[in-house]
Image: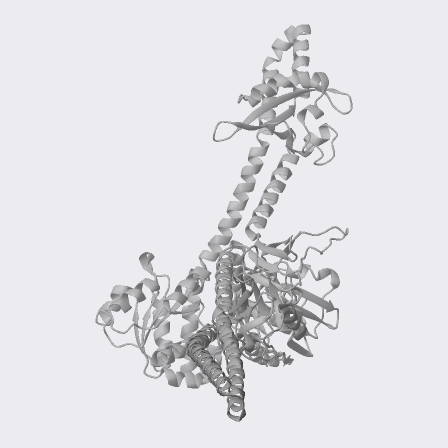
Amino acid sequence: MVRTSTRRSPASPLDDQADAAHERLAALELENHKLRRINAALIERIETGASGRDAAYAAFQHSVELAEQVRERTDALNQAMAELKASNKLLSDARLRAETAHQHLIDAIESISDAFVLYDIEQRIVLFNKRFRTLWSRSGVRIASGMRLAEVRRLVERSGLVAEEHRGKGNEPTVYRLNSCRWMQVSERPTREGGLVVLYTDITEVKVSETMRREQALAQKSRLLQRAVDNLSQGVAMVGAEGALELWNRRFLELSGLAPIEAHRPFEEVMAESELKLLTPLTLDDDGHPLEEVEQRLFDGRMLEIRTHPLPTGGYVNTFTDITERYRHAEALRESERWIRLITDHVPALIAYVSADLTYEFTNKVYEQWYRWPSDGMLGQGLREIHTGEHWQQLEPYIERALSGESVSFEMAEHNHAGQQRYMLRSYVPNRLGSGEVAGIFVLIQDITDRRRTAEALHQAYQNLEQRVRERTAELTSLNEQLLCEIDERTHVEARLREAKREAELANLSKTKFLAAVSHDLLQPLNAARLFTSALLDRDAGQSGGLIRNISNSLEDVENLLGTLVDISKLDAGVIRPDITSFAVSELLENLAMEFRQLSGTQGLALDFVASSALVRSDIQLLARILRNLLTNAIRYTSHGRILLGCRRRRQSLSIEVWDSGMGIAEDKLEEIFHEFKRGDSAQPYQDRGLGLGLAIVEKIARMLGHRIQVSSRLGHGSRFSVEVPLARRASRVRSETATSELLVERLQGARVWVLDNDTAICAGMRTLLEGWGCLVVTALSESDLARQVDNFHAEADMIIADYHLDNGHTGIDVVTTVNARRATPLPALMITANYSNELKQQVRELGHMLMHKPVRPMKLKTAMCHILEKGQG
């Protein structure tokens, strides 16, 4: 253990003076002792001696002299003693002051917050305080005064007291990190005598505070970087040198379909959970070259561009860009170019386009064949390379005029690939930009050899047979007019073809949009009839119940037929758009199994269902339509055996499969069955085979959702249809509890319902149906009609059912907004419409209303009304 040193400092002048006084006092005492011994001997000799009077006198005199000397010496000794006492007093006072100052020095160095140690000129320890001793308390080393500085340093290295050393630059102090995780700053200062003072300052708190400030600054920079990355339109993922994911943004999670992930996970493991390909700077293509970018189509139809960028410090950054729109534009341009090329390739004229630098950017098939170039071989070639020598010299003046903005037409002779001379009519039309600058030249070349030879023949005939020419002038004029008409007709072929194509496209689009738009009018009377038949079924279960049920079934068949045709038209017109959500697949499959188990039972078939707990991402309504069509086809084309509905998990998707033991499909018909109006042979002779639109709708909806449809079949053994749906991590839909029809009717007893529809039959049908369920119903054809009946919307009510499309451009949403603005408590609303657009779904959802599509099925209407009433009571 280390002790505080109490060694005195080197001798001072006061100590030297005291030592001299002590030596003088000792000498005087010795001399006085000798004189006393001499005096005693003389007196004894006088007293015992037999000498005479003179001798006695002389002896007495001598003794007196000796006594005087003794007295003088005694006085001197006393004076010396007095001086010695004074010196001792001064020395004691000086020693006391020195000890006091020494103690003050010790107290001072003990009171400072730093560890202190003082070395003398020989680099030996003179003083140190308790804080210096505390530094060595855990090392087992004993520090004592007198130890040399070099020995102290060896003890430091041997004991492992210092874990880390940071030497300062220039005059900056050295900083040490001790094995106790404390930080010490060492300052050394020389003394005037050549010694050394060393201070050990504990800067742990300063270091911790500095570290916290750096960490806070780093965290702030990290947050700013994360915010900047999160605001990028691209998905970004930064991977460290060890292959762990260090930084990413929300766009990356969205494009890759991943849930929130933890940092520092291996990037390869993260990408394995998505449907995206893993791309790193080490990825190679089929030829073994580094692959820096790839394009990938997702299951939902989107197209992504993935790029990788290596970092100089190791690791890399991947960017994920949604290029769906760009890809679609490129496809549209390619399709447009394909049509242009198709038209121009069949025009009997040479057509080309050259840029301002006279480089070919477009040539039709006739142009390439004339100059004997392969397909697209002229693109990128210069005009001078195709037309050389004298031919180019003839064309150059006309080309210069066209580049200056002038439209030029001229005739010139040219030899074709067979060496035949042909006369060509060339037309150069400049392509002007909005600024007036010429960006290129449209080239149109027509072979007028026949016309010119005809003209030359006519001219020759005119010269040789002038009379005959006069007689047949009218005939030749007619012939010339026909030739001119034919030339004009050929000139305008391209325009007529383009116009015909545009008219056909407009007619097709008009047809599809018309069918999609009139779905409301087609389904409106059917909706009313279904409401009436449902009300009759609820009221009459006697002998006429079977007849009413047959009517209901027939209406349902007509409804399904019209619905199928309208769905086809809506899909073609782009009216239907998917509403993608996450949900439990059991929510869909269990309902379908319950629905089709009864239907298959009536056909003598068994339907087996294998449940699944998977979560998927899709449009639940459109996916249900796909599976209903597949199940309907399975029952229709299976005469005996069973139907199986189940799922298989893939890597990132779920395959929902429908198996049957039916008649099967020939291999050469597997693609044809997805075409419109293509039907297979029914398993039963008198069974309805449908219109052959079910699988066409399946294929269109699946393509719109980005789901893959697969089919395999064996004749006489059955078929398997599957739709592949991407998996989800959590469901955004809450499964609703089912209830029996009787329980739903009990919940609706006494409910006060307002019905708004501009169709009288719909109002009557809804009143009949709802009153049969025990509701108190008010029906109205318009907003003013409803206001008149319900005290300007202040009457008591539980809910309002409104048709979306009303008269005079009004909507049910407008009326509900007006109604709730005048009431203290707003009414819950149920919107009914034939409009399947996602914009309307989103609007109704944001307003907090419920939406149902026509035709309205009574059971779904009951369930929706009960849900609204329960929500209102809760």
**Picture layout, residue 336 above or below residue 585:** above
What count of labels does the image hold?
0
Q: Quadrant of the N terminus?
A: bottom right
Quarter residue 341 falls in: top right
Q: Position of residue 768 (x, y in %)?
A: 36, 76
**Picture layout, residue 443 above or below residue 635:** above
Q: Position of residue 399 (x, y in %)?
A: 60, 21
Asked if residue 705 shows in the view, the reply is no
* Left-right relation of 398 to 233: right
The foreground one among 611 and 225 is 225
Q: Position of residue 722 (x, y in %)?
A: 65, 69
The foreground one among 326 and 528 is 326
- The residue positioned 47% from the left and 53% from the top of the image is 514
* Left-right relation of 325 to 372: left
- The residue positioned 44% from the left and 64% from the top of the image is 523
Quarter residue 866 falls in: bottom left
* Left-right relation of 96 to 19: left
* Left-right relation of 86 to 481: left
Asked if residue 142 shows in the view, the reply is yes
The foreground one among 12 and 673 is 12
Q: Quadrant of the C terminus?
A: bottom left
The foreground one among 23 and 555 is 23
The color scheme shown is one colour
Q: Position of residue 429 (x, y in %)?
A: 56, 25
**In the image as oriented, which residue stretches furthest toward the bottom?**
48
